[in-house]
Amino acid sequence: MDSGSAEGSGFSAMEDYESLIATTDAELLKRSWRNEKAAPEILQFETSLVQRSREQIQLMEETLEEFTRSGIDPLIVSLYQMDVDRTLFLLRSYLRTRLQKIEKHMFHVQKTTELWNRLSRQEQKFAKRSVEDIEQHFEQSVLSKLPDRYKSHLKQSIISEEDDMVPEPPLDTFVICRSKSFLGSFQLDDSGEEKPVDLEADDLYALRYMSIKPLVQSGQIDLV
Amino acid sequence: MASQSDPHGSAFSAAELEFLAEDEMVEIVPNMTMDTLNLICGDFGPFRPQIATQVPLWLAVALKKRGKCTIRPPEWMSVEKLTQVLEAERDSERFFQPLPFHYVEISRLLFDHARDDIPEVYMVRSLIEDIKDVRFHKIGTGLEIISERTHALKLKNLSAMEVNIVRPFVVRALQTFYKLDSPEMIQESDRRANRRPQAPDHGPRRQLRTGR
């Protein structure tokens, strides 16, 4: 897996630069939304992108108010309104998809530093409160009535070695993705048993999420 | 607007795919004058009567609904091009013709909102239906190649909607074969098998019975 990301790292910097100058925030937001919706685990929060999108929406809403006051053609106002609505929808759906993921795997997210650090400050607050609420709920409704050794909300019983009652995101799952550029032959499995797959630009592949995770994170592959 | 999709099923709902397709560019011919629109998703216009300009589909549809423009159907949506595509789809059992990623959604939006701008609209519509059918049939037979040796699947030239429809099946099939193949799985089932006989020592069964 490491080889995949190392090979592409030079590429990635260039790609990043290209996409930075060629892509609008609306495009970037759409990409983050798609990736977030299609990835089994929670991805890095796009702090500055979300911030910028929020500012743009706010600015547009102010402009719209001004338009309405100054009596500009209602057609033009409605077109601007549609544009704001579309961006708002993307932003809301992006944030909501993340909250759903956090709710689903809150215990796992909380105890895994790597995942925890991907959350925004507000999301961390949300996760913390969700965990507290669910713990309290489990405690009051079930756990307090069980014998001592079954009282944990993380483990089936005290003899469990791992936290076996904590649902984890299914990283073994397959995702459908598209590479933006030719990524060369790509080793899918760490075992080395599998034949490498040629990842060509713009073609769609169904691949195991684990094997392309670094490429999703570096932005070389988009989930579809 | 597009509703949230079910997190357990397909990644995207049909409405969400339509939302994405609405960002594809089309050419319109306005019949009014309007200054450039500086939108969040980009700058479009200026709009002058009879001067063609490129806009996203959602904007084209919005203007069309108000009778402010005609939409020029994309080049691939002509009877001639579609007939070629259909023939080529039928000729090859394995390969798919390159069509726009959102061809299904784009054509549907145009049929719904700009019928009068599409020459030979009935013919175009039935060609697209036929192409869709042929492709779906091919996808169905194509997926039969998934086996325990399949660790990656190339879906060359499949469209957004086609991918979204086969996604649940493809993902589960690949995942199942992967799990059956992986050494961890075998260990896992060993471990479970070992653990089970110990269970009565901790008394969960008795608990369950008294509970009833």
Image: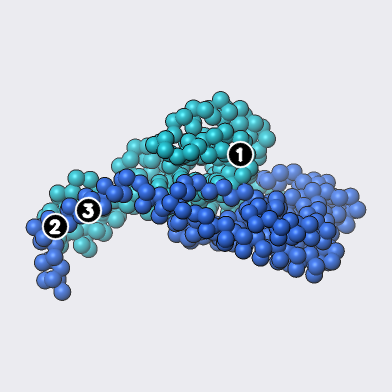
Chain colours: A cyan, B blue
Between the C-alphas of marks 2 and 1, the distance is 51 Å
Query: In the image shown, does A89 or B154 lie closer to the viewer?
Result: B154
Question: What SS does tag 2 mark?
Answer: helix
Q: Amino acid at mark 2?
A: Pro
Residue at the location (57% across, 61% down)?
B140
Q: Amino acid at mark 1?
A: Glu
In the image, taking residue A69 as reference, residue A207 lies left or right, namely: left
Looking at the rendered structure, the number of numbered marks drawn on it comes to 3
N-terminal of the two: label 3 or label 2? Answer: 3
Q: Which residue is mark 3?
A: B192
Q: Residues within 10 Å of mark 3 (few under 14, many from 20)?
A: few
In the image, taking residue A179 as reference, residue A120 lies left or right, namely: left
Q: Which residue is mark 1?
A: A200
In the image, taking residue A160 as reference, residue A177 lies left or right, namely: right
Q: Position of residue A199 (x, y in %)?
A: 57, 39
In the image, taking residue B190 as reference, residue B145 lies left or right, namely: right
Q: Amino acid at mark 3?
A: Arg
Q: Residues within 10 Å of mark 1 (few under 14, many from 20)?
A: some
Residue at the location (71% across, 66% down)?
B130
Q: Position of residue A20 (x, y in %)?
A: 63, 33
Q: Residues within 10 Å of mark 2 (few under 14, many from 20)?
A: few
Question: What SS does tag 1 mark?
Answer: loop
**Chain under callout 1:** A
Q: Is residue A17 above or below residue A95?
A: above
Contact, mark 2 vs mark 1 (Cβ under 8 Å) = no
**Same-chain status of marks 3 and 1:** no
Q: Is residue A74 above or below residue A24?
A: below
Question: What SS does tag 3 mark?
Answer: helix
Which labelled disc corresponds to residue B197? 2
Query: In the image shown, does B17 or A6 lie closer to the viewer?
Result: A6
Quarter occupied by residue B86: bottom right
